[in-house]
Image: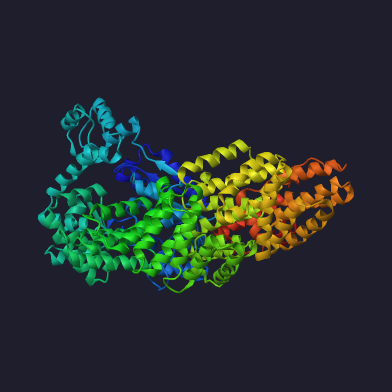
Amino acid sequence: MDTTSTELLGRAGELERLAELVGSARNGRGAALILRGEPGIGKTSLLSHATNDLVGVRVVRADGFEAETAMPYATLQRLGSPFTDLVPALPGPQASALRIAAGLEDGPPPDRYLVGLGMLSLLASAAEREPIVCVVDDAHLVDPESLDVLAFVARRLEAESVALLLGTRPDARVDVRAAGIDVLDLAGLEATAAVQLLIRSAAHHVDPYLAVRFAEETGGNPLALVDLAREFTAQQLADSSIAVGPVPIGQRLESTYLRAVDALPEGTRRWLGIVAAESTGRTTIIDEAALRLGVATDAGAPAERAGLASVRERVRFRHPLVRAAVYNAMSAGERREVHAVLREVADGQGRPDLAVWHAAAAASGVDDAVADRMERAADAAGGRGGTASRARLLSGAADLTTSGPLRDARLMAAAEAAAAAGAAQHALDLLDRIEHDRVGPADLDPVTEGRLLMLRATLALFVADPDGVRGGTERLLRAAGLFHGRAPELEQRALLGAFNAELTSESAVRSGTLPELGRRLATGADVTDGRSSLTLRALGAHILQPYPEAVSIMREAVAMLQDSSDAQLLELGSEAVALTMALWDERTCVELLERTMRAATEAGNLRVLDTTLWVLGLVELVRGDPAASGRYVAQVRELRRAIGYDAEQVVNASYLAWSGAPTEQVEQIAEATLPTGFAGVWTIAMTGLGIREIADGHYRDAYERLRPLVELDFIQVTYQQLPDLVEAGVRSGKVQEARAAADRLAEFAAASGTPWILGISARAEALLAEPEEAEALYLAAIEHLDRATAPGELGRAHLLYGEWLRRMKRRREARDELRAALAIFERVGAPAFAARASREIEATGEHIAAHEPGDDGAPRLTPQEETVAHLAAAGRTNAEIGAELFISANTVDYHLRKVFRKLGITSRRQLIERRPAR
């Protein structure tokens, strides 16, 4: 029995699980699995056995190497290299992203998730020829960009003939980056199999009792059982078995391997030292380095005969612990000497990325020349979209840099790169290093300190730091002050960030007054000319000036935003939403958000896409379309699954209120957000509950809930609460307060004049009007809102008019209006308003059959199927839907076939008829 089969004793269950995974790929069902286990537990043997000699399946392998941990997409390049002929046929942005990531094409640095979508499409395309099994061992040594892409691909596999297997040691970095992927934890062998393996491997007869004890003390670790048993005599096994405490497996194995190494000729030991330092195992580099160090190129033969290493296309140690034993046994001087030679060889062979790693390992203490080289490598990594690798290289460069401004600048740039890569805690640790090194307040230059404050304000949102969230506006205004007169563009960026932070925190904000923020924005508009200047001027006017005076400058800024390029849209915060909603221009607001969504999708910028989809969901609620909002919530959940976040935490409390969730549940969710500093989320939830209470006829409750929100008077956020306060006030006897709110709406309507605000204002006036004036106002409201894109508001206008007609004893006309309202509410998924409309229709004497809205007897679609169906009905192709949802075209086709089956249709034309685009 060979070594591999011996080490697989007792692994039948694990092998069966791996065989099932390969079977899924054969059957067109994509699957992924992580094998996780301590050194020596047998994951490499399992991966090899499960994927060797497969018939009708193509296996591609690419293991992780320590020297490549700061080389962006190094592992991915090796994994995808067999399929490069398929890249030109991929969608243009995906193909370009793959080529730029590989350093084969110049262009803007691609987002890692666009690279991920490209890799998913590439593997799906390759799998149309034959099933593909991708094997990546030592994933804990894979560069972070490749690991992110592999994890993304693993989560999106569904209807592709692809299986992905990752082997790793327990590693926190892998746990975070590969969250959401199934994990098979490899434990030690159970007692019977462990004893059997020990007895088969031992050089001498072993007493069964001692074998059981030794198996227990090694935890059933196969490598320990095989390699230690072969070295130990029966007496040594006995001595070990009665020792106090368990056998320290890693240390004991390293000692075992080191004794084997010590028995080899000196030249072989030197050769092994070169191999240990050149962790990628490239024979061309190892051979040349050996010659330069005076080591014969055939010096590795004794190590092969001893079973410590093998020389094929690459040199591989029997186990990473052998490499660790060899490397750790070298003196510091020997290691630096070997790395220095390897740096020269790598440079000579045109591998600057590998050379810089060896240069850093050869450095001793501060070395500004090597630090400069690492910074250049970091810039190159960033140019390929390798933000995590850039952060790692810059951090290493800072370690080798003389203390002073340059070191601070490198740490600052490293923190910004780490934040861009989504490594928020790592970024904070780097910022702490900058501040820890400071001796006095003058040690850090103002621009660097301003950048530090800006980044801390941003990171507070990612790590949910309540004090950081509440203090975001204050921190960003301080940063703007530090930039003033030194970095005008950064000053304006900080001021825009302060406005966005204010919207996030609202009443919880720990800063000055809102007018003070407005003055800072207005002053900051004058520090330079450009797009940001106009935006700041408009936001300042929005806060400070009377509404009629602010409208023109806000319109000018919105027109500029409409002329933005896709790249410029990706840089926007909430200012576009703030200005368009302040102007009651919901159409332009949605157009800008949808353009941003498409730009983010094409760029693979999932962070911007996630935010944009979330904001679109909120805007749809303002427009009164909970169904559309729900689709966006579903997309956010699916997107967060794709990037490994907990999708169940995606909860829009206002959407729940609109959709009929119990009030107590919504209130609990909303109250839980207040301690986090995200008071804006609480406000949105309270507004949704107020609308729900209006729908249920609880007008006094709605008024009491909405009144303090309106009294807060928080710019455009309050504008959207005024119409509901009017209805709640009129119906609860608070006519004077309702009149004041309606007057403000009339001022908005006169100055802005969009169909939305004209309709809203007319509806408010109708509620307050005398009977002889009310009808004309209701009709005007319906006419204006019919030209707007706010279906819920139109439905409420029909509802209020129908209720008024019923009170006027005009029942037939009332039914027409109420039926129109009911149809809208059922279409947009507003059950509370639908129930109110049904009750009113019943009150006219017409019976309404009880049914669930949208219940036509057909099986319900899943959220993903609903989204695919909606996009297909809007005319999108499979490739376009796949790009928007970050899945392959195969998976889109899979979902569409399920949609057709559930709906009993056979074509897209029938789908459009059944589900017209809203």
On screen, residue 70 versus residue 509, left or right, reads: left
- At 65% from the left edge and 54% from the top edge, which residue is drawn? 897
Looking at this view, is 743 or 147 the one in front? 743
Q: Is residue 99 visible?
A: yes
- Residue 752 location in percent, x, y? 65, 65
Q: Quadrant of residue 484?
A: bottom left
What kind of colouring is applied to the model shown? rainbow
Image position of 636 (left or right of 63): right
Coordinates of residue 324 in the picture (x, y in percent): 21, 49
Q: Quadrant of the C terminus?
A: bottom right
Instruction: Please give left or right for residue 799 compared with residue 287 in the image.
Output: right
- Could you tell me residue 612's position as x and y percent? 54, 58
Q: Nearer the viewer, residue 476 or 164?
A: 476
Q: Where is residue 620, by image quadrant?
A: bottom right
Q: What percent of the width, then of the height, locates residue 735?
A: 71, 46
Q: Residue at x 42, y 45 (%)?
A: 466
Residue for point 58% across, 39% down: 667
Q: How many marks?
A: 0
Residue 61 visible in the displayed image: no
Which residue is painted at 61% across and 62% down in the image?
A: 590
Frontmost residue, 659 versus 900: 659
Question: In the displayed structure, does residue 652 sit left or right of residue 389?
Answer: right
Give above or below for 258 relative to 574.
above
Quarter of the N terminus within the rendering: top left
- Relative to 558, does residue 914 appear above or below in the rendering? above
Instruction: Give the camera-side residue of 61 and 235.
Output: 61
